Amino acid sequence: MTTQPAIVLINLSKAYDETHGIHAINLSVDQGEVFGFLGPNGAGKSTTINTILGILRPTSGTISILGLDHFKDLKKVHQHIGYVSGDMETDKALTGKQYLEYVANLRGVSKTAYQPLIERLDADIHAKIKHLSRGNRQKIGLIAALMHDPDLLILDEPTSGLDPLIQAEFNAIIKEHTARGKTTFISSHVLGEVQAICDRVGFIREGKLIKVTTLEELMAHTPRNVTIHFSSVVPKKEAFALPGLHKLSHRGNSVSFTYSGDINRLIRLLAGHSVSSLEINEADLEELFMNYYKKETKHV
Amino acid sequence: MFKSLYTKTLFDLRWLLFGWAAGVAFVAAITMALYTSLSQSGIHSILATVPDSLKPLIGSVDDYTTIPGFIGQQIFGPNLYIMTIVMAIIVTISVTVTQEDDRRLQTLLSLPITRASVFLQKWFAIFTIVTLASASVIVGVYIGLVSVDKTADPNRLLESVAAFILINVTFAAITFALGMFSGKRGLTVTVASAYTVACLIISELAPSTDKLKLADKFSLLHYYNNPQVMQHGLNSIHMIVLGSVCLVALILSFVRFKHRNIGT
């Protein structure tokens, strides 16, 4: 494996027409990283992934995968990639066993290499794929994507249809994959889905990458839900005029608000009052996610 | 069977191939079995009443009273090739644009296989199926000949089968080229079907009207069994024309398929 970044996109654009497509995306994903690619439906996630895979031809820009030139070495690139999407279509007339054998032959992988994955995901490989539930079809797709222990795993909303137990197993597989120094690029329109496994996330909106940040940084700036119960007089509204404090509401002796500012300033404010209880809840990432798509687009 | 895209495609279409081959052989055998009764049933007087414009479709007296004429018209004529050309188009559409339409092609292209390889393996799979299914006609003809206790010139029969295979392969190639070039299912089905119907109509009517003589040159059927291979042997110019059409169509679509977007 090279020391080059797993994915480098430089000014990558794919235009269908004036409004649809992706526009000048610049992104670098390091090896060993789990990168979450987030955006609502139609934002350009699948277009970006299909362009990386060479299924769509970019209008402009360059793509480098593990140091390989995407346009010159696409077959080599695909040897390093495992890809699965939530709406993946396979040869449904085949059984899971036949399909996996076929993919293994195309990848040059022995049949025994993916047997542990079949057992781990408890996949039904003897029924025809067309007779399987969506979740079971997804398992076959995941095994096909993971069977060659790819250096780069590209997942396009992969866990739709998976039950919570299998989803937990899937997360464990991704973590083991990362622990071996391999990279995962996972797209989703649900932040919570990638929260458990990602190091960094990028937000895409209307074909433009609007923010790339670490999950840590994201959490630090995400508004927390705060509820304070006062044992005596509730301070006036003006007393809560702190930067990052929003959605203030009073109810009896209680005050609730969202707070994304310095926690020490909040504690100093409360020091002069008689507080009976204080609740600071975990950051609500989904709310932050929604805020990104409500705000004016700000290009990174 | 799952070593390559080529063998996997043959596996996918195995029942269609068996059914098609059996159907072609069955129709040929049944048609041949009717030779004795048709050749002795006062066909001369019936054909005397047929208008000239319908004679290319129905055939002449020789096409009912001699074995080469009967095989040339009743086996390798419109009765059978209309069926096989339609089958060739259906098979080709199922292997090309249908798989792009339902996103199976996108999944395939995410695996380590080049577009060139996908194109060639799919084409060779279609070529194999169309060739085998078309060649099964010879089995039917032999069974039919045995049943009526007649014989036919084996060389001419093989030449006729070669021409029969080539015309079916050419229609498959045109459809394949349209599908791989455009990736559009509706467009491919419409253009391939419309062109086939136009070919059938033009080639059947052209002998009886001068106005269609030029248009007939653009019909692939003009270069098939015209005149009958069973009686006159293969026309090498016609074989070259059909072969060239296949080659040009495949080269153009190959170049386009290598560079276009898939599934948009």
Image (cartoon, rainbow, N blue to C red):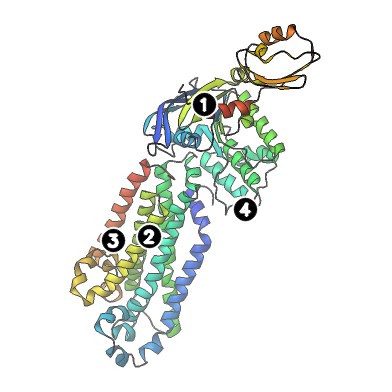
Give the letter of the chain under mark 2.
B
Q: For this view, does A21 lie left or right of residue B69?
A: right
Q: Are marks 4 and 2 in one subunit?
A: no
Q: Residue at x 51, y 32 (%)?
A: A80
Tag 1 and tag 2, C-beta contact below 8 Å: no
Q: Residue furthest left?
A: B210
- How crowded pointer 1 is (Cα within 10 Å; few <14, some 14-19, many 20+) is rated as few
Counting residues from the start of the chain, the first of labels 1 and 4 encountered is: 4
Q: Residue at x 33, y 90 (%)?
A: B43
The one nearer the camera, B172 or B37, is: B172
Image quarter (top left, top right, bottom left or bottom right) of the C terminus of chain B: top left
Q: For this view, does A95 lie left or right of residue B181?
A: right
CA separation in Å, label 4 and label 3: 40 Å
Amino acid under disc 1: Lys
Single out the mark in the foreground, 4 or 2: 2
CA separation in Å, label 2 and label 3: 22 Å
Residue beneath disc 2: B190
Q: Secondary structure at mark 2?
A: helix
Give the letter of the chain under mark 1.
A
CA separation in Å, label 1 and label 2: 46 Å
Q: Position of residue A52 (x, y in %)?
A: 46, 33
Single out the mark in the foreground, 1 or 2: 1
Q: Name above or below for residue A91 compared with residue B144.
A: above
The one nearer the camera, A215 or B129, is: A215
Give the letter of the chain under mark 3.
B
Residue beneath disc 3: B242
Residue beneath disc 4: A128
Q: Are marks 4 and 3 in one subunit?
A: no
Residue beneath disc 1: A295
